Image (cartoon, rainbow, N blue to C red):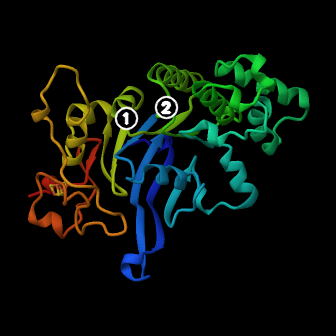
């Protein structure tokens, strides 16, 4: 049984739908279900990985959790507080506990602000230091924590490499000592050697500050390295969720099995040993009835085309949405 005292974030039945007008439907409105009924917990100080192909809704899910975009339905409980219902000052205060790091730090850093002002911005908004000296001392402390040379303080984002810009983004994210950071593909745009340094930095900060991460990535190897537990998303749905070791050792869902089979391994297998997924990911505006994966699943059965499988605990702590594991 899970100890609720360890839970920092509880996401319950989160949905994010968009109305779109489609020319092919003669101007009729249709609904894109980018995130469709997702639930999970994140414990204090843990890293929860989210994987899936691009377009599966993982970034939309992250932005809905932090309310950068407003969820259509569902609840987000952060540190015992209903984050989804907060407004005004209360929302602003709660947002100090949860931060977001983006894939492209350059796009998220104001090009007209110096490094010092970028890092100080959340501190200034929160008004958490009484004097300018205290505020400046905090900026210095944070720059040291993320390995930024203090000589960079008065420079601008365009003067830095991708890795350094990501350090600036991380410095801004940790300035208020958040409890949770949502990392949305934080190393995807970086060279492999720089990726390792940023991942090590995130690990170090977690050890020192006890921060929890939701680590969103399409890179299964990176997620395996950093995450304690992993959720697998497909077409706006959570398909499987387990601790990292169990999931990578014994994936249960046919989609996860196909994803993992596609990880390149030097000299270990032949191409014909891999499970190559047929077909394209269906449009989220017109998803298949029943199981979302039924149009591509090598193990599809009749029931899969009409009934959506429950997301159920198949083995202790290992959840899966697939009719193969229905109790007979
Ligand atoms: Fe495949 Fe059916 Fe399981 Fe979906 S429910 S993953 S279609 S076997």
Q: Is residue 21 left or right of residue 322?
A: right
Q: What x and y, as percent, mark residue 252?
A: 19, 43
Percent of width and height locating residue 45: 51, 32
Which mark is on residue 219? 1
Q: Report whether the residue tagged 2 is closer than 8 Å to ligand 1.
A: no
Above or below, 97 relative to 187: below
- Please give left or right for residue 129 compared with residue 233 in the image: right
Is any atom of residue 33 visible in this view? Answer: yes
Q: Residue at x 53, y 56 (%)?
A: 64
Q: Nearer the viewer, residue 4 or 10?
A: 10
Q: Quadrant of residue 96?
A: top right
Ligand 1 quarter of the rendering = bottom left
Task: Identify the residue under disc 2.
Answer: 187
Above-or-below relation of 235 to 246: below
10 Å crowding of disc 1: few (<14), some (14-19), many (20+): some
Looking at the picture, tell me which residue is in the foreground, 154 or 181: 154
Residue 245 spot, x, y in % from top left: 29, 30
Q: Earlier in the sequence, mark 1 or mark 2?
A: 2
In the picture, which quadrant includes the N terminus?
Answer: top left
Seen in the image, is 312 located left or right of residue 14?
left
Q: Residue at x 36, y 64 (%)?
A: 284
Q: Is residue 44 visible?
A: no
* Quarter the C terminus occupies: bottom left
Q: Name which residue lies at 42% across and 54% down.
A: 57
Under circle 1, the secondary element is loop
SS at mark 2 in the image: loop
Circle 1/circle 2 CB separation < 8 Å: yes
Q: Is mark 1 within 8 Å of ligand 1?
A: no
- Circle on res. 102: none
**Relative to 11, 160 lies left or right:** right
Which x, y percent locates residue 17? 46, 67
């Amino acid at each position: 049984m899970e100890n609720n005292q360890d839970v920092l974030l509880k996401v319950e039945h989160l949905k994010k739908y968009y109305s779109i007008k489609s020319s092919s439907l003669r101007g009729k409105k249709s609904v894109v279900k980018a995130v469709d009924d997702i639930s999970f917990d994140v414990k204090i100080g843990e890293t929860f990985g989210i994987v899936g192909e691009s377009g599966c809704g993982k970034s939309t899910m992250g932005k809905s959790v932090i309310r950068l975009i407003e969820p259509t339905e569902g609840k987000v409980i952060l540190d015992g507080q209903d984050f989804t219902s907060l407004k005004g000052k209360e929302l602003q205060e709660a947002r100090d506990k949860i931060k977001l790091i983006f894939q492209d730090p350059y796009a998220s850093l104001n090009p007209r602000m110096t490094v010092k002002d970028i890092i100080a911005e959340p501190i200034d908004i929160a008004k958490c230091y009484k004097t300018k000296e205290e505020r400046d001392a905090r900026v210095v402390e944070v720059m040291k924590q993320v390995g930024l040379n203090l000589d960079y303080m008065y420079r601008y984002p365009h003067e830095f490499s991708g890795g350094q810009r990501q350090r600036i983004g991380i410095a801004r994210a940790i300035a208020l000592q958040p409890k949770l950071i949502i990392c949305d593909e934080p190393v995807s745009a970086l060279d492999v050697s720089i990726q390792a340094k940023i991942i090590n930095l995130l690990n170090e900060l977690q050890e020192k500050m006890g921060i929890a991460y939701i680590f969103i990535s399409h890179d299964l190897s990176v997620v395996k390295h950093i995450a304690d537990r992993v959720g697998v998303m497909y077409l706006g749905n959570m398909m499987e969720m387990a601790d990292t070791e169990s999931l990578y050792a014994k994936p249960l869902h046919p989609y996860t099995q196909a994803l993992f089979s596609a990880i390149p391994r030097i000299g270990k297998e032949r191409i014909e040993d891999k499970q190559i997924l047929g077909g394209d990911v269906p449009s989220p505006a017109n998803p298949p009835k029943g199981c979302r994966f039924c149009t591509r699943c090598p193990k599809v059965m009749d029931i899969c085309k009409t009934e959506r499988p429950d997301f159920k605990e198949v083995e202790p702590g290992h959840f899966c949405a697939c009719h193969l594991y229905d109790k007979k």
